[in-house]
């Protein structure tokens, strides 16, 4: 899953993505996830 | 007795559920729209039907969980209202946290569409009281993500509290690996929550409620709820 987020820095970007994974993108009962950040623009 | 059948974008068993509960069972039944922000006060049981809610994007039931009606269904369940989730509805219930566990992709990785046998494990629930203990019934399945999964501790708790209502079995009632169509742990086909008012089932009882179809084994699920509600009201 690729997400594009607006953030001031990598830590903030990671938090936004992590929050999205925990609330929606991932079902922790049967899935796990990792986050790889790439700065664009 | 009045059933409320939720219609999500992508539901495709909503009319079957309405027909089964009204024409076959003889109860009152109505649709509830996914954007509804309330459930009528005379609804006794909410049914989340099968289908592909919101296209099953991301993960089955993951989007439906956030729909306006689900906020009301969760509140309804917490107040003790009866809720049945069938197939995609079961997936919505686990995603919502109303039932434990999750429905993972079938062990064979393929969509499975056929008739299976179920063994009644617990007939002391509001959703199975019309069946005899160990009674074998035949219901159709049609799913790609129906492999019931939960961690070991949760499974032990479900078993200890008799929350497993139906298991996949063969025609003689033997619970075997061969009779498990999707790889569900302990051949689990249907579970009830700890409080006993929320039920999830992967097979489709609403599709076999009319004797004209040659099988009315599914009617017992809805009859059980009606009997239970009648007892509560009486």
Image (cartoon, rainbow, N blue to C red):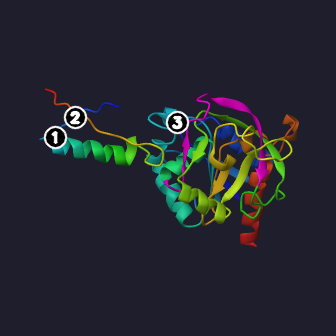
**Residue B96, image x, y percentages:** 49, 52
Gap between marks 3 and 1, in whole Å? Answer: 37 Å
Does the magenta-highlighted stretch encompass residue B117?
Answer: yes
**Residue B233, image x, y percentages:** 72, 71
Q: What is the quadrant of the C terminus of chain B in the image?
A: bottom right
Q: Which residues are magenta?
A: B97-120
Mark found first going from the N terminus, 2 or 1: 1
User: Residue B102 versus residue B196: which sits nearer the camera?
Assistant: B102
Residue beneath label 3, please? B9
Dot 3: element: loop
Residue drawn at x 74%, y 53% is: B222
Instruction: Indicate whether B91 appears above or below B45.
Output: above
Query: In the rendered structure, the residue with mark 1 lies on which chain?
Result: A
**Residue B29, image x, y percentages:** 69, 50
Query: In the rendered structure, the residue with mark 3 lies on which chain?
Result: B
Q: What is the quadrant of the N terminus of chain B in the image?
A: bottom right
Residue mark closest to the camera, 2 vs 3: 2
Q: To which quarter of the image does residue B191 belong? A: bottom right
Residue beneath label 2, please? A37
Does the magenta-highlighted stretch encompass residue B67?
Answer: no
């Amino acid at each position: 899953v690729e997400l594009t987020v607006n953030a001031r820095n990598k830590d903030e970007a990671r938090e936004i993505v992590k929050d999205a994974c925990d609330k929606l993108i991932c079902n922790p009962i049967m899935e796990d996830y990792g986050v790889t950040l790439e700065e664009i623009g | 007795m009045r059933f409320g059948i939720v219609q999500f974008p992508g539901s495709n068993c909503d009319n079957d559920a309405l027909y089964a509960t009204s024409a076959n069972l003889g109860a009152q039944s109505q649709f509830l729209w996914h954007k509804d922000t309330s459930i009528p006060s005379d609804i006794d049981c909410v049914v989340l039907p099968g289908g592909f809610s919101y296209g099953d994007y991301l993960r089955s039931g993951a989007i439906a969980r956030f729909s306006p009606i689900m906020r009301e269904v969760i509140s309804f369940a917490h107040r003790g209202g009866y809720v049945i989730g069938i197939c995609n509805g079961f997936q919505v219930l686990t995603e919502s946290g109303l039932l434990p566990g999750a429905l993972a992709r079938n062990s064979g990785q393929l969509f499975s569409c056929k008739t299976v046998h179920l063994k009644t494990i617990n007939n002391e629930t509001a959703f199975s009281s019309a069946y005899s203990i160990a009674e074998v019934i035949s219901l159709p399945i049609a799913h790609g993500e129906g492999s019931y999964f939960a961690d070991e501790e949760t499974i032990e708790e479900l078993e200890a509290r008799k929350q497993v209502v139906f298991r996949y079995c063969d025609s003689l009632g033997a619970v075997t690996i061969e009779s498990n169509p999707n790889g569900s742990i302990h051949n689990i086909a249907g579970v009830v929550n700890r409080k006993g008012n929320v039920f999830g089932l992967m097979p489709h009882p609403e599709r076999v409620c009319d004797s004209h179809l040659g099988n009315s084994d599914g009617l017992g699920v809805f009859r059980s709820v009606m009997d239970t509600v009648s007892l509560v009201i009486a």
